[in-house]
Image: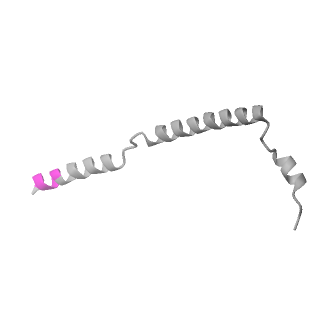
């Protein structure tokens, strides 16, 4: 009986450690966000060169209240 309890405890420990393992999800998310930020900076720089970025202030001045 003690062997069954011991093996059940070991299996529960193994399963919980695997289920709760971090797995690198935080690192992957951080890398994804850094890539998105770099892409947005490149996009804004490209659009500023083209002159087609509409600033929020200009947009608010031209809109009318309904």
Q: Residue at x 87, y 68 (%)?
A: 66
> Left or right of 6: which side holds 35?
right
> Left or right of 15: which side holds 25?
right
Q: Residue at x 52, y 36 (%)?
A: 31
Pick the quarter of the image with the N terminus. Answer: bottom left
Residue 38 covered by magenta stretch: no
Q: Position of residue 65 (x, y in %)?
A: 89, 64
> Left or right of 4: which side holds 62?
right
On the image, which quarter does residue 37 sit in?
A: top right
Q: Residue at x 80, y 44 (%)?
A: 54
Q: Position of residue 16 (x, y in %)?
A: 31, 50
Q: Residues in magenta? A: 2-7
Q: Residue at x 12, y 55 (%)?
A: 4
Q: Position of residue 53 (x, y in %)?
A: 77, 41
Vertical order, 12 against 25 (above or below)? below
Residue nearer the viewer, 32 or 5:
32
Residue 4 covered by magenta stretch: yes
């Amino acid at each position: 009986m003690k062997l069954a309890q011991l093996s059940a405890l070991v299996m529960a420990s193994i399963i919980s450690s695997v289920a709760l393992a971090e797995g690198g999800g935080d690192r992957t998310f951080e890398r994804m966000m850094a890539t998105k930020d770099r892409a947005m900076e490149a996009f804004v720089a490209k659009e500023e060169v083209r002159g087609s970025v509409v600033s929020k202030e200009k947009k608010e001045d031209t809109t009318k209240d309904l």
